[in-house]
Amino acid sequence: EIVLTQSPATLSLSPGERATLSCRASQTIYNYLAWYQQKLGQAPRLLIYDTSKRATGIPARFSGSGAGTDFTLTISSLEPEDFAFYYCQQRRDWPITFGGGTKVEIK
Amino acid sequence: DVHLLESGGGLVQPGGSLRLSCAASNFNFRTYAMSWVRQAPGKGLEWVSSLTAGGENTFYADSVKGRFTFSRDNSKNTLYLQLNSLRAEDTAIYYCGRVMFGPTYYFDSWGQGTLVTVSS
């Protein structure tokens, strides 16, 4: 099973600041990585797929990068609605796995 | 907009069974693979199962293999997840998700979830 490790567990930032979230895979997953946002009490929402492609309707302030085992989600300037949980997910191999999540909270 | 609506959750005793449903609308259901993902209270996301568009191939997490059965009725635009031999650790919100076309096994639309609680 491919294990995804997200860091940090919590990121405390102010609106307008840049957020950098990390996801590390236990073995290469090429570029087969997605990022999801989940707000409290809501279903997850797909933000990024194949490492760097934005899903439909996702603002340009969200970007993804990386390859192999190390991946990054960047939010260039945090909006109030961006404070939420973020999960990475790999589809390189079965079983599909998710990272443990990063909480982006207001400082 | 794509719409997915789960139902069938509830309180069940350990060892019991439950059948979840997911009604899909506003997209060509029969051409998409679909999946279930769950989330235990206060925890992260866990993939449960995926099923190809025509229902030919099904994939399960080891934690549910042999106990859960994922099926679909393309004439009714509905998914089913049969949960048997339930354990306390199966307590979670169960989301159905549409697999992005390819299939890519990323999940581009999600329902709001249905809560399954396994407790005596």
Image: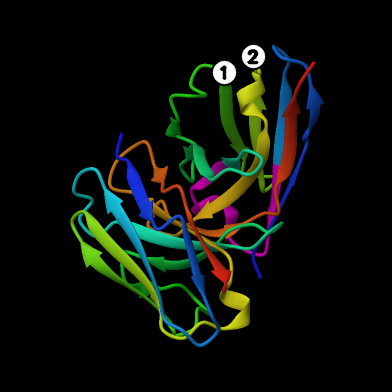
Residue toward you, B38 or B76: B38
Q: How is the image coloured?
A: rainbow
Question: Residue B26 appears at what percent x and percent y?
Answer: 67, 64
Residue count near mark 1 (Cα–Cα under 10 Å), binned few <14, some 14–19, many ≥20: some
How far apart are the alpha carbons under marks 2 and 1? 6 Å
Lower position in the chain sequence, tag 2 or tag 1: 1
Tag 2–tag 1 contact (CB < 8 Å): yes
Q: Residue drawn at (62%, 81%), measured in percent from left and top?
A: A80
Residue toward you, A33 or A4: A4
Chain letter behind tag 2:
B
Up the image or down, A60 lies above or below A39; here it is below
- To which residue does mark 2 refer? B85
- To which residue does mark 1 refer? B67
Q: Residue drawn at (54%, 54%), measured in percent from left and top?
A: B98
The answer to whether residue B37 is visible is yes
Report the residue that reaches farthest toward the front.
Answer: A107
Report the amino acid beneath label 1: Arg
Residue A82, quarter of the rendered image: bottom right
Q: Secondary structure at mark 2?
A: loop
Q: Magenta region: which residues?
A: B22-37
Report the amino acid beneath label 2: Ser
Quick check: A57 left or right of B2?
left
